[in-house]
Image (cartoon, helix red, strand yellow):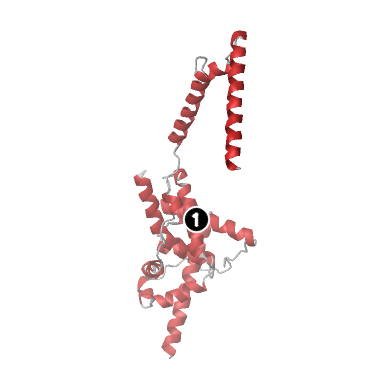
Amino acid sequence: MKDKAKLMENIWIEYHPKLQVYLKQILPGSVDLEDRVSDILVKVIAQIDSYNPEFALSTWIYRIARNTQIDEIRKIKPIEAEYDDEIITNSETPEDLFFKQYNLESIRECIEILSPHQRELIFLYFYEGKNYREISEITEIPVGTLKFRMSCCKKIIKDSLEKEHKHANNY
Amino acid sequence: MQTTIKNYYDLEVSKIKAPPLPTIITKKTIRPWENILLASIAIFSMVIVYMPGSYNSRIRNLTISPNNRETIKKDITRVFQQIDLYYSEKGDLND
C-alpha cells in the first residue's frame, strides 16, 4: 500500500511536466494544460492495476494521454489529417556535429515549424528515447510509416537549420 | 541531433513544476478484502437476528395466552392513563 502510494507520487511528479510538454507538441496553443494533465494522471493512477509490465510504464502513460487527448479533440471537432507525407526524401541521418553549432533557440524555431504529429514523433523519439515499436504502440501508427515520417522530420529540421545558417552568414 | 533536441526538451520540461498531488489520489480507498469483510459482517448480523433462538425471533413469534391478555390490556391502559396525566399536568403548568 505504501509502495503504491509512493509509485503514484513518483508518477505524478515525473510525468506531470513531461505530459504537459508532450500535449503541447500535439496541440500547440492549447490552454489549461495543467488541469488536463492532472485529469489524465488521475486516470492513469486509477487504472494502474491494469498496467501490463510487458510494456514500459512511460509507453503506457503516453498512450493513455494520447487517447484521452484524441477523445477530447473528437468531442470538439473531427480530427484533420496534418501529415506531410508528400515530402519525399531519402533516409539520411544528420551528423551530430552539424547540430552542435546551433543553439537551443534555433532548435526551438525548427521544431515549431513541424506539424503537431511530427512534433509528437520527435518528442517521443529524441526526448523519451522510444524506439519505433514503442512509438507505434503509443500512436497506433505502423512502424514503416513512422520511419518515413521521421526521415521527413529530420530533413525539415536540417533544411531549416541550414537556411538559418546561410541567412546568418549573409549578414 | 538526438543530444541537441533532447537538451531542448529537457529545458522545456525543467521549466514546468508538477502541482501538489490531489488528495483524491492519496485518500485511502476501500480494498476488495475490506468489501468481503463488510459483506461477511452483514451476513453474520442477519443470521444472528433471524436465528430461531434469537431474541428477535422470540419477539416475533411471541404469543399471548388468553390468561395474560387481560393483564396486558390493563397494563397498557394504565400506561396511557399515566401519559395523559403527565401531559395534562404539564399543560396546566404552561398555562
Local crowd size for mark 1, using a 10 Å CA cut-off: few (<14), some (14–19), many (≥20): many
Q: Is residue A2 visible?
A: yes
Residue found at x 48% / y 47%: A47
- Residue furthest to the right: A78
Percent x, y for residue B37?
A: 44, 31
In front of the other: B35 or B78? B78
Q: Is residue A74 above or below residue B77?
A: below
Residue B32 quadrant: top left
Percent x, y for residue B34?
A: 44, 35
Callout 1: chain: A
Percent x, y for residue A116?
A: 53, 66
Say left or right for A113 vs A103: right
Residue found at x 58% / y 24%: B79
Residue identifier under label 1? A40
Total marks placed: 1
Q: Is residue A133 visible?
A: no
Percent x, y for residue A134?
A: 45, 54
In front of the other: B35 or A14? B35
Element on which disc 1 rests: helix
Residue found at x 44% / y 38%: B31
Say left or right for A60 vs B77: left
Name the amino acid type tagged 1: Ile
Name the quarter where the C terminus of chain B is drawn: top right
Residue B2 quadrant: bottom left
Residue found at x 62% / y 17%: B73
Name the quarter where the N terminus of chain B is drawn: bottom left
In front of the other: A144 or B27? B27
